[in-house]
Amino acid sequence: MDTRRTARIAIALLATAMAASWAAPAEAQRGRFIPPETLRIEEQPGYQPSPEQERLPAVYRRQVVFFRTTEAPGTIIVHTSERFLYLVQGNNRALRYGIGVGREGFQWQGLMKISRKAEWPDWRPPPEMIKRQPYLPRFMAGGPGNPMGARALYLGDTVYRIHGTNQPQTIGHAISSGCFRLVNPDVIDLYDRVPVGTRVVVRQAPEM
């Protein structure tokens, strides 16, 4: 095998490896590219995003949208497949937030109510997460570097929450263990709008 042919094969193999390493997964879409190695990290305790990092792409920014539903105003509707959370306003309108959702195998649907609210909640990773990421702390007090973010809305008596995040780059992706995450400015806004007892509807797909 001559030197030039060897070089061509090496370059081709390198290009293939780079493409496989940086190919965006199915959920990495709608205007942003995130390397797969970033998405594989569930939580990064201690990291504090800047205000600029928390400024989302236009499609995921909080906004009032046309939204037809039979649910009453004040209801929260989560569309997992769309990566959006809607707060029903009435008159075919809703306040829409971009969210991160559970990855494959951790998605769910059903009816819940907000059972509790907390500002700057503490974080206790469940045993399943510790098993996947054994380096995680067993407890972390609430604060800017906490993966639970600035606010948490607890769903019934489950382990699931609507909460903030210290990883704004994960909004619009399926990466969590079943919770729904918003950037901190958005979860603070939602927290201030909804009381304990709010009905929460989680759907895998939009209403037809």
Image: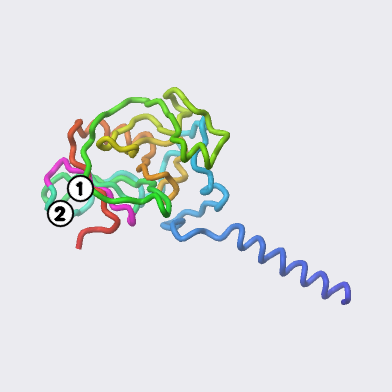
Q: Report the disc number at residue 124.
A: none
Q: How many marks?
A: 2
Residue under the image location 20 percent in, 47 percent down? 94
> Is 73 one of the magenta-colored residues?
yes
Q: Looking at the magenta stretch, what is its main secondary structure? A: loop
Looking at the rendering, which quadrant does residue 1 occupy? bottom right
Between residues 167 and 66, which one lies in front from this camera angle? 167
> Is 81 one of the magenta-colored residues?
yes
Between residues 179 and 62, which one lies in front from this camera angle? 179
Q: CA distance from mark 1 to mark 2?
A: 9 Å
Q: Are marks 1 and 2 in contact (CB under 8 Å)?
A: yes
Q: Residue 98: x percent and y percent?
A: 34, 47
Q: Residue 200: x percent and y percent?
A: 22, 43
Q: Which residues are magenta?
A: 72-82
Residue under the image location 30 percent in, 44 percent down? 62
Q: Residue 87: x percent and y percent?
A: 22, 44
Depicted 184 relative to depicted 108: above or below: above
Q: Residue 21: x percent and y percent?
A: 61, 58
SS at badge 1? strand
SS at badge 2? loop
Residue under the image location 37 percent in, 45 percent down? 178
Which of label 1 and label 2 is nearer to you? 2
Please name the amino acid that badge 2 sits on: Thr
At label 2, counting other C-alpha atoms closer than 10 Å, the crowd grade (few under 14, some 14-19, many 20 or more) is some
The residue identified by callout 1 is 94
Depicted 149 relative to depicted 36: above or below: above
Q: Quadrant of the C terminus?
A: bottom left
Earlier in the chain: of badge 1 and badge 2, it is: 2
Please name the amino acid that badge 1 sits on: Ala
Residue under the image location 22 percent in, 42 percent down? 112
Asked if residue 97 lies left or right of residue 10, the reply is left
The residue identified by callout 2 is 69
